Amino acid sequence: MSFRQEPSFSHGTPATTAVVLANLGTPDAPTASAVRVYLKQFLSDPRVVEIPRLIWWLILNGIILPFRSKQSAHKYASIWTPEGSPLKLHTEKQAQLLQTALSARGHAIRVEYAMSYGNPPIPALLDKLKAEGCDRILVLPAYPQYSATTTASIFDTVFKHYTKVRNVPELRLIKHYHDHDGYIASLAESVRAHWQQHGRPDKLVLSFHGVPKRTLLLGDIYHCECYKTARLMATLLGLGKEDYLVTFQSRFGKAEWLQPYTAPTLEKLAHEGVKRVDVMCPGFTSDCLETLEEISMEARTDFLTAGGKEFHYIACLNETPQWIEAMADIVEQHTGGWPISHDEQAARRADAEIGRMRAVELGAKS
């Protein structure tokens, strides 16, 4: 096995700390060719699709990519902004604001973002951080609820990358924060702010990204963590069980996924006489195709066509100040014991300089 070329190393140089905010990814453009490249990488991940590789290769390359790429490109085009992909823009802004929040707290922590699929890729960022002297890295997935299909895929990428690195940095990986006080409070505050402006709905629908039911039966904890998030959020909002629903969206293929499904549930609510629904996607920390197109556009149409009168989509946390502060809290908790303050870093640099000076003196005397 060949190892990557190690950057130059100077003994006594204080290690620096970096946070990698890792999100799912997005195509580079809302075109069929760009979407095809992205989907091939995404759907080739065995964490995402657990079907025997040869069979899945034939399905993916012979059926899905030729037909779904163009269809998905149209969907991406409907949400694309002049600056680019909403998911990428929000993730980049979150990283910048998190860097500012941590600096304001006196921490010398660098924050960068990367994607599991598409650009910028996680391995390239890890190489960049190593070349620039980062020897302590905290990986912060953009997924509050753990799933083998998402969070574990990030971990796989990180571990695989370092199999070819000699001098591996100190690593910490955040598994989940689905019940973190700051995260829950940020969600609740977003709902309150929306209700203060628009009034309350007949029903609040909390739509999480779906996964195959098989993953739950095999031990994935995602389902339970989604319900815990919803329960804690409802408690903070003072909601009863009759006031909200948990649903799951983005089903793909013919296998059974976690239920109830979002779109059929909204249609059922409309048929039952529910006039207004507010829909929020707590599992997404950044607005993206699944929230802006699938929920705010498609699900809206489903509900109104079925007889509903009013549909409100409550945006993801994105760059809300309370969420940025909550992210800073999460980072602080998971960097405990690391020298991350500016004062600590300055002291270590001073110690290193003294050590180098003494070495020079000893060398001169000898």
Image (tube, rainbow, N blue to C red):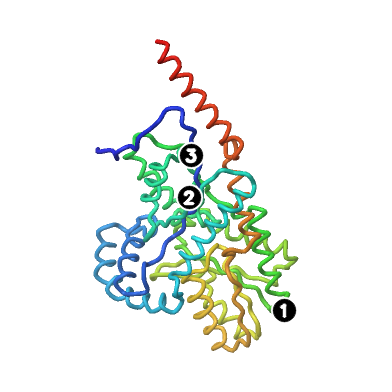
* Percent x, y of residue 233: 67, 62
Mark 2–mark 1 CB contact (< 8 Å): no
Q: Which of the 4 image quarters holds residue 269?
A: bottom right
Point out which mark residue 20 bears: 2
- For the residues labelled 3 and 1, the Cα–Cα distance comes to 46 Å
Q: Residue at x 47, y 40 (%)?
A: 171
> First in sequence: mark 2 or mark 1?
2
Can you say which quadrant of the picture contains the N terminus? top left
In this rendering, which labeled residue sits more in front, label 2 or label 1? 2
Q: Which of the 4 image quarters holds residue 165?
A: top left
Q: Secondary structure at mark 1?
A: loop
Q: Secondary structure at mark 2?
A: strand
Mark 3–mark 2 CB contact (< 8 Å): no
- Answer above or below: position of 278 versus 235: below
Q: Residue furthest front?
A: 364
Q: Which residue is mark 1?
A: 199
Q: Which residue is mark 3?
A: 136
